[in-house]
Image (tube, rainbow, N blue to C red):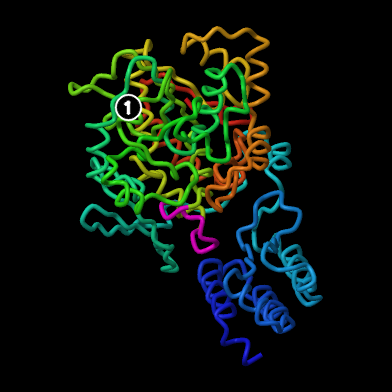
Amino acid sequence: RSENTRTPVYQEERRRAQDLYSVHARSCVLAPVCVCEAAFCSELRESTTPKIVAEKERNPPRFFYNFPPGAADPMEISTSTVSAASFTAASLVAAAAFKALLNRNRNRIGRKFASAASLDAGKGGSACTGEGSLSEWEVIEEEGKGTLRAKLRHKATQHETPWLTFAKAGGMHTPGFVTETRLQWMKENVKLRKGDVVVDTYPKCGTTWTEQIVLLLLSGGDASQLDPKSRNAYRLGQNYRKVWPVVIAEKKDFPQVRAILPPYSELSTMITPQQFADIPGRRVIKEHMNREHFVGQTKDGQLTPGIKVVYVTRNPMDACVSAYHHPGTSSPEQGDAFPFPAYCKWFLERGFAWGTWFEHVRGWREEWKRNQEQVLWLQYEELHDDLPKAIAKIASFLGIEASPEFCEEVAKKSTIKAMKKQAAASKAKETSEKPHVHLRKGKVGNWRARFSEEMFADFKSEYDSTMKGLGISYNIGNGEVLA
């Protein structure tokens, strides 16, 4: 054992156990963590071949301490890098002991492991099953030249989350590949034209889903023209794909721009402004820009004549939960060291990126009120509640004839399940990225499983003060409305 305790794998698990205890000391979970730790070392000791040990040191099994409500077992172990045979009896005994201890102390600890559905059935539609308070956390920011780093600190325990990293552009914090220089270049050089369709959203509000629908409408429902694995990214010579302006650059600048782009299949093909202009027919463009920095406006700030903007919005709580699970340095997919209430604090006060959800939605709502000929207001919840009806609404806005039968056909090919299936079956292998990393649950009201009543009250208060007078209401699940 003394030899195994010096391995990087053991040291990392011990560090995570100490972080856990510092945050959740009141939950009395140190003992089961030690049981798991001992089992982990025992399991590592059983694996004696250098190949297995090396693989485990690169990808150690993860122990999840923030259990998702409704989980069949409060302890989930990722086994993607370890064969079933390598899990020893000690690991299984530890898992059983951990579960038994949690069950025995559930009332004393005060944890709520029951599913959101069962709690809702007993308490009514307003039940929230999460725990935590945003007021327990404080934001720490460090600004550099064109960059921003941020982390959150728990006021009582002084636990600090990992850093979130951003660029700074247009007075906003943005993903690292949208610098001030790139933002200004895109606004000046990416020219839209009459007939272009722009799908603009705040991140995690239905972008990929809506793009799929628009492309199916334009292609006559031919799903073989699409590639959900790459999020339907444009490739030279292919029609019925979308273009994200961040991949447009002068050819001489390709190396510098490519160097800051993340390794997503969506961003693997760069094109020049001329190649963008040469795309035939109606082009589909993706954006996350707020109204102020929209790529596709005239010098006097008006939308380019003849373009159509499908703006998709989603209730802020579900958007926050989805953002929390988004992989990348601007979001906290970093294990248990980044508690969900801490990220809620960040999302509410600073936002995922591109400003806050509230600023983004308010700006586009005001544009929609002025210019409904060019802007369609669409809510994620509409797609979820009646997809064929929402598709008919989009088709009408774009001037596409769509019978009820055609809308049903498009709906079948643009469900979350259908898109995941097509993405998984895709033969495109541009990167090692998971094929449907952007497609999660596609649910409405899933936020209840993570939010406490106090967290929801904070979001509701911000919504009431920021969105007043805009006439917006959101279905937030269980028959309730945020208005």
Q: Does the magenta segment cover residue 236?
A: no
Of the pair 172 and 302, the residue shown nearer to us? 302
Query: Does residue 102 appear anywhere in the picture?
Result: yes
Q: What residue sits right under mark 1 in the picture?
A: 363
Q: Position of residue 342 (x, y in %)?
A: 45, 55
Of the pair 272 and 165, the residue shown nearer to us? 272
At horizontal 53% and vertical 51% (from top left) the residue drawn is: 431
- Residue furthest to the left in view is 300
Up-down: is 8 above or below 286?
A: below
At horizontal 46% and vertical 30% (from top left) the residue drawn is: 237
Give the structural element (helix, strand or loop) at label 1: helix
Disc 1 crowd, CA 10 A, few/some/many (<14, 14-19, 20+) = few
- Three-letter amino acid code at disc 1? Gly
Residue 375 placement, left or right of 303: right
> Which quarter of the picture shows residue 20?
bottom right
Q: Position of residue 202 (x, y in %)?
A: 42, 35
Residue 408 placement, left or right of 26: right
Please provide the residue range marked out in magenta.
Answer: 328-338
Q: Does the magenta segment cover residue 337?
A: yes
- Residue furthest to the bottom in view is 2
